[in-house]
Image (spheres, rainbow, N blue to C red):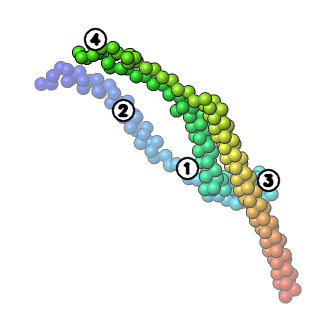
Amino acid sequence: MIHPSLKMRTNNYNKYLPFLAVMLLAATVQAQNPTPAKKPYSANARPLFDTGKVVNIREKLVELAMQNPEYEIADRRIAIAHYQLAKAKGAWLGQVVFQANFNEYSIKPSGSTVGAANLFPRYNVGFSLPLDLITNKGNEVKIARQNLGMMQAEKNQRFRTIKGDVLKKYEAYLLHKQKLDLQSQSTLDAYSVFLGAEK
């Protein structure tokens, strides 16, 4: 004989069974859909004179050249300069000193010193602030800012140099390709003239 509470739990689970079956079926159907394969790059996708393609190729070449370790080093130097600037801004906190001292003989005198004269103060409080704090730390922050600016300028210079080199080499490639196309065409023309003269 089945206990009534177990029978009730089984009925509750039976309500969710169709929903679970539909979800599993949908997941199975979705898993059967093939993902669209990437089409291989075709050089004939656009005409050769398409300037949009040339600009896009130039941008892509420059983008690939920016994955250069030298450029990554420049990025990391900028990050270091940011950290040095933050360190210089917070360095003044290490110069400010606050001290407190409580004298145990004044607070809780022992049995032998109860009637004796006590020349110790109950507590001492001290605060130390260096006189050159404002000028010295201000100059350190300015130096850190200038270092950050130098690193950013160095990164920009590297970007311009790499971009110029890549574009110069790409233009030389296009020029040599054009020369090769012209030479191939003239060779084919001369060969067809030769074959025509031979007949």
- Give the residue drawn at x 64%, y 50%: 74
- Does residue 122 sit above or below 2 in this rendering? above
Mark 2, residue position: 20
Q: What is the C-alpha distance between the residues marked 2 and 1?
A: 29 Å
**Crowd around label 1: few <14 · some 14–19 · many ≥20 (10 Å):** few
81 or 22, which is in the foreground? 81
Q: Which is more N-terminal, label 3 or label 4?
A: 3
Task: Inspect the image, locate mark 3, and give the three-letter code of the amino acid beneath it.
Answer: Thr
Q: Secondary structure at mark 4?
A: loop
Q: Which is more N-terminal, label 1 or label 2?
A: 2
Q: Which of the numbered marks, if any, corresponds to residue 51?
A: 3
Disc 4 to disc 3: CB gap under 8 Å: no
Can you give x and y, in whole percent of width and height, for residue 198 in the image?
Answer: 85, 88
Q: Which is more N-terminal, label 3 or label 2?
A: 2
Q: Quadrant of residue 176?
A: bottom right
Can you give x and y, in whole percent of width and height, for residue 19 in the image?
Answer: 37, 30
Task: Inspect the image, locate mark 4, and give the three-letter code of the amino acid beneath it.
Answer: Gly
- Give the residue drawn at x 56%, y 53%: 37
Disc 3 to disc 1: CB gap under 8 Å: no
Nearest to viewer (mark 4 / mark 2) = 4
**Crowd around label 4: few <14 · some 14–19 · many ≥20 (10 Å):** few
Q: Secondary structure at mark 3?
A: helix
Q: What is the C-alpha distance between the residues marked 4 and 2?
A: 89 Å
Mark 1, residue position: 36
Q: Which is more N-terminal, label 1 or label 3?
A: 1
Nearest to viewer (mark 4 / mark 3) = 4
Q: Residue furthest left?
A: 1
Can you give x and y, in whole percent of width and height, for residue 110 in the image?
Answer: 25, 17
Mark 4, residue position: 115
Task: Inspect the image, locate mark 2, and give the three-letter code of the amino acid beneath it.
Answer: Leu
Q: Secondary structure at mark 1?
A: loop
Nearest to viewer (mark 4 / mark 1) = 4
